[in-house]
Amino acid sequence: MKKIVLCLMVSLLSGCFFSTPNSTFYLLESNAELEPVSQKRLSIAVQDVLLPDYLQKPQIVLQKENSPELKVSEFNRWGSDLEGMIQNTLIEDFQRSFPQGTIKPLLFGSSAQYIVKLNIEKMTGFLRQDAVLSGSWQILNRSNKVLRQADFKLTTPAGRTYGSYVSAQSKLISELACEIAQAIEAL
């Protein structure tokens, strides 16, 4: 009995002296300073974003360029589902690019004029190095015919903190949204 009481007291006291760091949560943000690409009244639907399995977790994952090693940060986390955040950020950036347009997520039975598909192959980087966003995109019409497609690889300095890394990825998503918006405008 004394051993049990002693173990409980040690456990309680150790909890007082050792604490787990608090997690910090981050959200991607659209670029409020994006200039309109067109005043056309377009309807655009953004399909669910495809991400590699290693990014489909609440923790922020870092990876150095040309390295197989991943760093999963237990205490720096996404504030929401990453695929959904990327989709919503694209939608907000497209809305700024086409202020007269209707931009929504792709829903079953959607009759949007254009459908945007995004496949992200890498959303990586490392603190004090570059943030990288790469993959491919497609623009389809209502009949699912591919009108334009391209591969992309965008980079920008990641900064020194997880907050600056998330801001860098937000910036890259906005650059990608501009690239796709210009391709839609050219159709």
Image: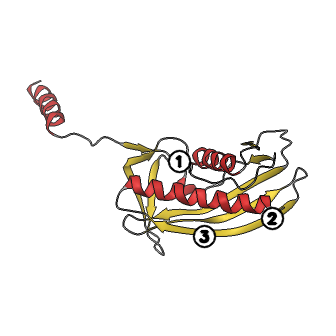
Q: Earlier in the sequence, mark 1 or mark 2?
A: 1
Q: Is residue 99 above or below residue 53?
A: above
Q: Position of residue 27 (x, y in %)?
A: 49, 45
Classify 10 Å Cα crowding around label 1: few (below 14), some (14-19), many (20 and above): many
From the viewer's perspective, is 157 left or right of 21? right
Q: Secondary structure at mark 3?
A: strand
Residue at mark 1 to residue at mark 3: CA–CA distance: 20 Å
The residue nearer to you, when weighing 43 against 117, is 43
The image quadrant where one finds the C terminus is bottom right
Badge 2 density bin: few <14, some 14–19, many ≥20, Cα 10 Å: some
**Label 2, label 3: how far apart the Cα atoms are:** 17 Å
Q: Is residue 122 left or right of residue 137?
A: left
The answer to which of marks 2 and 3 sits earlier in the sequence is 2
Task: Name which residue type carries label 1.
Answer: Glu
Can you identify the residue that label 1 sits on?
A: 29
Residue farthest toward the right in the current orientation of the protein:
143
Dot 1 falls on a residue whose secondary structure is loop
Question: Is tag 1's residue or tag 3's residue first in the polypeptide sequence?
Answer: 1
Q: How is the image coloured?
A: secondary structure
Instruction: Report which residue position mark 3 lands on.
Output: 153
Figure quadrant of residue 183 = bottom right
User: What residue lies at 81% left-to-right and 45% top-to-bottom?
Assistant: 41
Picture residue at 76% right of the left edge, 43% below the top:
100
**Taking 125 as reference, is 135 left or right?**
right
Q: Amino acid at mark 3?
A: Lys
Residue carrying label 2 = 148
Count how many numbered circles sit on residues in the image: 3
> Looking at numbered disc 2 in the image, what kind of residue is underneath it?
Arg
Judged from the image, the secondary structure of the residue bearing numbered disc 2 is: strand
Camera-side residue of 179 and 34: 34
Neighbours of disc 3 within 10 Å: few (<14), some (14-19), many (20+): some
Q: Is residue 122 visible?
A: yes
